[in-house]
Image (cartoon, helix red, strand yellow):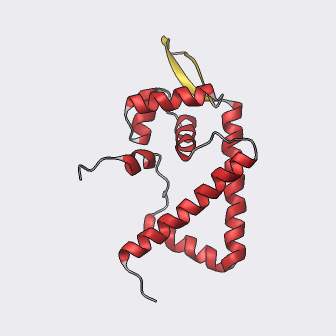
Amino acid sequence: MTRSGPELALLLLAGFRELVDEAIAELARRGYDDQRPVHDFALRAIAGGAETASDLGRSLSITKQSAARTIALLQERGYVSTEPDPRDARRKRLRVTPLGFEVMHTGEGIFDDLRRRWSDRIGARELETLEDHLATLVGPQPVRFDTPGWMARDLGT
């Protein structure tokens, strides 16, 4: 069966959505019922060096105000804290808390479980082949932190 380009894009999106929705549901079952995909992107960006709302906004391609709201929510939930910047005492820098790292690692384990389920459904070799083909098509660094901003951007249409 030959599919169209839009059908391919929708299949890829549906696969992404299925994995993310299942991971969010499993996180909720494990007691992290306040997690959303954007929170993981933000935690990973902060762990990767985004120390301020401006840094986070640039990393996620969202406004500084949206980044500040995300930071406030993550702080309220105990996933992120601030600490004095040793280079500038007037400035606070963001840090992922042990609880934030715990939820990130729990999510990673859930995605590994979901991958095993897909492997069981279509076969290990077929899944590896699919992954190899996707890596060839999208390159060695397929994950970009700016995905939340990219998905939400207004193209003026």
Q: Residue furthest top?
A: 89
The residue closer to the viewer here, 108 or 142, is: 108
Judge from the rendering whether residue 149 lies leftward or rightward of residue 142; answer left or right: left
Q: Residue at x 23, y 49 (%)?
A: 156
The residue closer to the viewer here, 18 or 79, is: 18
Judge from the rendering whether residue 8 lies leftward or rightward of residue 20; answer left or right: left
From what the image shows, is residue 28 above or below residue 142?
above
Judge from the rendering whether residue 153 lies leftward or rightward of residue 93; answer left or right: left
From the top left corner, tell me how far across and down residue 44 is, in percent.
Answer: 56, 41
From what the image shows, is residue 138 above or below residue 5?
above
Q: Residue furthest bottom?
A: 1
Q: Residue at x 50, y 28 (%)?
A: 51
From the top left corner, tell me how far across and down residue 11 is, in percent.
Answer: 48, 71
From what the image shows, is residue 2 above or below residue 92?
below
Q: Residue furthest left?
A: 156
Q: Is residue 8 visible?
A: yes
The residue closer to the viewer here, 111 or 91, is: 111
Res 139 quadrant in image: bottom left
From what the image shows, is residue 133 above or below residue 18?
below
From the top left corner, tell me how far across and down residue 64 is, in percent.
Answer: 39, 29
Count of numbered marks: 0
The residue closer to the viewer here, 112 or 48, is: 112
Q: Residue at x 71, y 33 (%)?
A: 99
From the top left corner, tell me how far across and down residue 97 is, in percent.
Answer: 66, 29
Q: Is residue 136 visible?
A: no
Q: Residue at x 59, y 56 (%)?
A: 20
